[in-house]
Amino acid sequence: MVAHLLRLKLALLRNGLRRSPWQIVGLVIGGLYALGIVIMCVAVLLFLRLQDPLIAQTVVVLGGSAALIGWGIVPVVAAAADLTLDPARFTTSAIPMPQLLAGLALGGLIGIPGLATTVVALATVGTWSRGVLPAAGALVGAALGLLSCVVLSKVVTTATASLAATRRFKDASALAFMVPLILMGPIAAGLTQGAAGSGAFLTGLARTLSWTPLGAAWSLGGDLETGRAGDAALKFLIAAATLAALAWCWKLLLERALVTPPYAGSSRRTGGRMGLFALFPATPTGAIAARSLTYWFRDPRYSGSLVAIPLLPVVLAFQGSQTGNFGVIMVAGPLTAFLLAWSISSDVSYDNTAFALHLAAGVRGVHDRLGRALACLAFSLPTVLVLTAGPFFLTGDWEWLPAILGLSLGILLTGLGLASVVSARYTVAVPLPGDSPFKKPPGNVAQTLAVQFGGMGVLLVLTLPEAALIIVQAVTGDPAFGWANLALGPLLGTALFVAGVRLGGRWLDARGPDLLAQLTVNR
Amino acid sequence: MSVPAAALSIRGLAKRFGSKIAVDGISLDVPAGSFFGIVGPNGAGKTTTLSMATGLLRPDFGTAVVHGVDVWAQPLEAKKLMGILPDGVRLFDRLSGEQLVSYAGLLRGMDKDVVAARVGELLAALDLSGDAGTLVVDYSAGMTKKIALASALIHAPKVLVLDEPFESVDPVSAANIRDILDRYVATGGTVIVSSHVMDLVQRMCDHVAVVANGRLLAAGTVEEVRGGVSLEERFVQLVGGRVQTEGLEWLRTF
């Protein structure tokens, strides 16, 4: 039965790949990335074999503890837990519980994260292959630690299954995940700086962790090497008890989950709240703008970028503080303008087949384009103005403000116009409605990359006049060119915006059904 | 060639997806003021045919004409005449039910006050008033079907094209929807529904077309098509594919 479950997992994996060659490309890229990390970890662990046991012990225990925490947290926040072997699907199969547990646990090791963790855990045996006893201890520890990782992730996913099934939780966790992701650079830099300055602290932390469920399993090899067999025996008991307790929790949760499927209900709300629809004019364009803007706030696939925008200056300011040159923060405005304008280039792809409503209602293409572009402009214009002007309070280079302001407005308007054309003609692979913004989207990756980079290249060309004036100002130092840019950016941008909306509208009128057919493929 | 009184007239519609011919030349006249059922087994090409007839899917061959307006030559004019409930497409489900139906009305350029009044009446008629402010993404399957139906009705079309309108709708709501559609037909509207529930089509519709493997097998009034036997029996005769229940003896060995 355990072998059956493992074969099922493998078959699911294989069939998933068979759906399109791009899935294989994705797996290969993910695999190479993981392979790089694994090779690095293994190299470090084998190198540690030659080092002082105290250092080796510290690294192994801290790394192991981090892996355990990671296996506990990632499935929840990523909202993309691997549910291919969702226990709820086995409700009707009447599989004996011990075999179901063993099969699901081992099945959790199949896949890139599981295999990578397995290899790295086994590499700790290499670290402690300084004698038979430490190596054996490390092997037992690695097995215990590895199983604890998998079972912990199962406990967490099973416990949060009914919670995670609610839309609100999915939305919120996806947005919460954005923050550490964007701030990863500063956080990592801060951590390494802190770690470098406090080696003694880390040794102490590792010693403490090795007595807790988090690190006990990973410390067996090191304790046996330094001859503390008594400590090792106690830590083995801690690690074994941890695994047993986790397995017991999982069994209880699973027994409950098998008879109570996740409930994803929510409360009823009566009407009378038209929201943004009440603020916009009651025309097709106004309605589309109101709908788009509502999505910017309600759909995590859109609002993820809204969370990212305020963090952008933080990251840039951090870069500035690292190098001591705050000039880089001036790009906050133009960069935001580009990111926000370009974000609607996949608007129709985000709609997915809901776009059929526009088609069925006979919406004119130009109304569709204009509504979407205006919704984006409604909040991106003030945002870009603030983020363009803000940095100058920090740097004081006020003579550059007109030029950068012109460039930002030019990029924003030109980008919106170009994005209106692009999304009327090409679909790109984006996460499906209701999916996490981090979920790997189905569809043609090659076309997505071609459209995205091709479009960005065209945008670069279209905004060359503004960029040229900036360069001229930098060379001559004459602020008059900055003022010229402040006039040129909005004027040229508006012209291209109007042209883009009209051209996109015409294309949409001509090719609306074909666009829907492309969207249907990725349903 | 099209019958003057035809609400929808399709000629030689055909569509191929890759190597599979989904619709293989279907011609059909739906008389104005009729309650027209399209029945067929799963994968018969019902949805593909209706998508092509309503301007959602470009046909490889053939034409579709709604009250004299060519759907593919004058799409905007034709779509004004039609209310469409497509099957298997998503909705803008991060809007509340009330917002979604209003959105459908405003997209058609309707007046704000008219939309507001009709949305209230439609939601009440479909028993969705209590959930008007709930996001559609949190609706059940049946409620989602009903809100999509309301979106198709909001602009008072002359022709209603409903693809599987009763799927996962509870019996009480289904009866309410049937009343609405009956009254609509009685006042001169035309309804085209696709379904594979024969019983429902026999009771509800006055005309029926049987489609299988992308071809039209029979069309006419329900009486003509079923010719004395029940529609279900006639359908099975036309489509074939019944398996003689031999074997499976072990199923009785419990």
Image (cartoon, coloured by chain):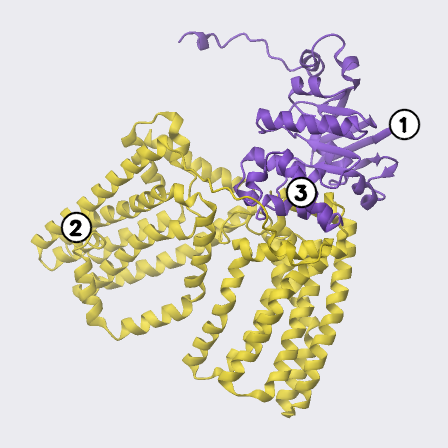
Give the residue pinned by disc 3: B119
Task: Classify mark 3: residues with Cα within 10 Å, few (<14), some (14-19) or many (20+).
Answer: many
Q: Residue at x 72, y 67 (%)?
A: A497
Relative placement, left or right, of B76 versus B113 is: right
Q: Residue at x 26, y 56 (%)?
A: A65
Label 2 and label 3 in one chain: no
Instruction: Work out whether mark 3 precedes mark 1 in sequence or the reverse, and give the earlier one.
Output: 1
Q: Residue at x 65, y 90 (%)?
A: A479
> In which chain is the residue bearing label 2?
A
The kind of secondary structure element at disc 1 is: loop
Relative placement, left or right, of A31 versus B209 is: left
Q: Measuring from the top left, give residue B38's x and y in whole percent.
A: 73, 25
Label 3 and label 1 in one chain: yes
In depth, the one of A190 and A217 nearer the eye is: A190
The Cα–Cα distance between marks 3 and 1, rounded to whole angstroms, is: 35 Å
Relative placement, left or right, of A45 versus B231 is: left
The relative height of residue A266 versus residue A453 in the rendered view (above or below) is above
Say which amino acid is labelled 3.
Val
Give the residue pinned by disc 1: B3
Say which amino acid is labelled 2.
Gly
**Residue A39 lies in what quarter of the image?**
bottom left
The Cα–Cα distance between marks 2 and 3, rounded to whole angstroms, is: 71 Å
Chain corresponding to purple in the figure: B
Chain corresponding to yellow in the figure: A
Task: Classify mark 2: residues with Cα within 10 Å, few (<14), some (14-19) or many (20+).
Answer: many
> In which chain is the residue bearing label 3?
B
